Image (cartoon, rainbow, N blue to C red):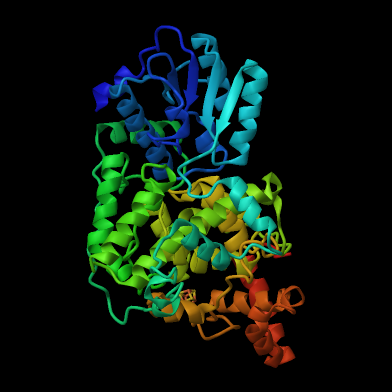
Amino acid sequence: MSSRYRDLRRPVRGSVHQLVVVLGDQLDAGSEALARADRAQDAVLMMEVADEATHVPSHRQRTVLFLSAMRHFAANLSDEGWRVRYVPLDDPENTQTFTGEVERAVGALRPKRLLIVRPGEHRVLASVDDWQKKTRLAIEVLEDRHFLTELDAFEEWRSERERPVLGQFYRAQRRRLNVLLTDKRAPVGGAWNFDSSNRKRFSKAPELPAPRRFDPDEVTHQVARLVERRFPSAPGRSESFGWPVTRAQSLEALSDFISDRLACFGPYQDAMWTDEPFLYHSLLSPALNLKLLDPREVVNAMIEAFEEDRAPIQSVEGFVRQVIGWREFIRGIYWSEGDGYADRNGLDQHGRLPDFYWNGETDMECMRQSLNQVLEHGYGHHIQRLMITGNFALISGVHPRAVSDWYLGMYVDAVDWVTLPNALGMVMHADGGVVGTKPYAASGQYVKRMSNYCAGCRYDPSKRSGPDACPMTVFYWDFIDRTKQTFRGNPRMRLPLTHLERMSRDERKAVRRSADSLRGDFDIGDAG
Ligand code: SF4
């Protein structure tokens, strides 16, 4: 593999009609851009640029994953007869920006036009406009057929209703794509979702199957060394790298999940346990978001497992919902809301992101576990992202942009189209309720119920003020108090608001004092 990578440094020879630009999260051999190109007269441009690893601080494993997967993909294209202009990060002539590299490639290869699949980020799409101005070439931005929903179709669906509701979108997707429906077009299993059977917790340490991990090959080792040299202060650690970097490995990871973990995925999808970073989760989001896996094949494999009695409906439906519902909905919202979405701050929160998000050093056991796992693997499962690291940031009053930037840089599967609506909308409720009808705020009691973290913690999850009060509980009640006017008319917030009203004035003052003191200790500053 390493020899094939070195071959890619050789310049592309001969005239080039069209230049196909393939970005790091577009590793789809069946993409519309490659389908429209002709390997006899066109060429492919792939670029490793420092800009992409530094515009937000990027976890070492995230950068290694993108670069290694790109190099493997380029080698495969080359093997299949494509001429590939591959610009490595350490090429002395690399300008380290997409625009600079496109200009250099156009200067060298003189193509008549450029083809690119729609990038997954407003910032990069804007830079494509820049390429057009600088190169004066026609650039065709093509629909990303990896996804199941065309953006125009999402926009039309959205325009027909007062507000976009994920549950409604998901049902429409099930019907449109004919997924898990009976002959009479009713949902298989008698319900559209089985979340009520999916809230199991572990009563003792679970015996878990080890997920398939992949030893880094020479290409990944080379990239890891390069990333260490080039970005010495990047967050996270790279030693435990085991992510799939090729399509073949991604398919292996898919079949490993189905055979070993899918059956228990549904029931235990919200559970957490000390020192268990992966539990029954799929670990497929990096391969899906780099487009090494196609969502259709993933969904079909899940359904096949259900039909062959290898997994129960609550696991299969729960996973399928993430792929055809949540993932497509989030992407639709990202493009539909436009590039101003990143600046929303609907709850007017302005706190600083505490240092422990970068070094994991905190005495809150739930945060220490979840953050160290991110530093170690560039990974957290959805409930840790939403209800631990996200919940803390939401209820303590951190600025939503600081949180969405951290989420974009720190998870190996992070691409802006998915991370921004997830972090800013779902986690931080900063979009005024576009993604979620209520904030996902929870106290330490929730953490105690769904994990064993509290058993090893110096704080008491039942206490909401005083020196050993749990910061999650303190900040939760402070958040409910701080935002009570905003959520007064929201029926989904009635329960905590009623509870708040029953608290005495002195109790509320004590909560506020504890919250202010904790915000000082954690250097968050003022929430609002
Ligand atoms: Fe987290 Fe509070 Fe539980 Fe400690 S007591 S682990 S801070 S929820």
Relative to 425, residue 149 above or below = above
| Residue visible at 45% across and 7% down in the picture | 15
Question: In the rendered image, is residue 283 in sight?
Answer: no
Q: What x and y, as percent, mark residue 439?
A: 62, 70
Q: In the visual, does 321 lie left or right of 525?
A: left
Front-most of 417 and 320?
320
| Residue visible at 70% across and 79% down in the picture | 481
Q: In the visual, does 424 lie left or right of 179?
A: right
Q: How many marks?
A: 0
Query: The C terminus lies in which quarter of the figure?
Result: bottom right
Q: What x and y, as percent, mark residue 256?
A: 24, 56
Relative to 482, residue 134 above or below = above
Front-most of 349 and 438?
438
| Residue visible at 25% across and 54% down in the picture | 255
Question: In the rendered image, is residue 68 in sight?
Answer: yes
Q: Residue furthest top?
A: 14
Q: Residue furthest right?
A: 485
Q: What x and y, as percent, mark residue 359?
A: 47, 54
Query: The N terminus lies in which quarter of the figure?
Result: top left
Front-most of 252 and 509?
252
Relative to 359, residue 25 above or below = above
Q: What x and y, as percent, mark residue 129?
A: 65, 28
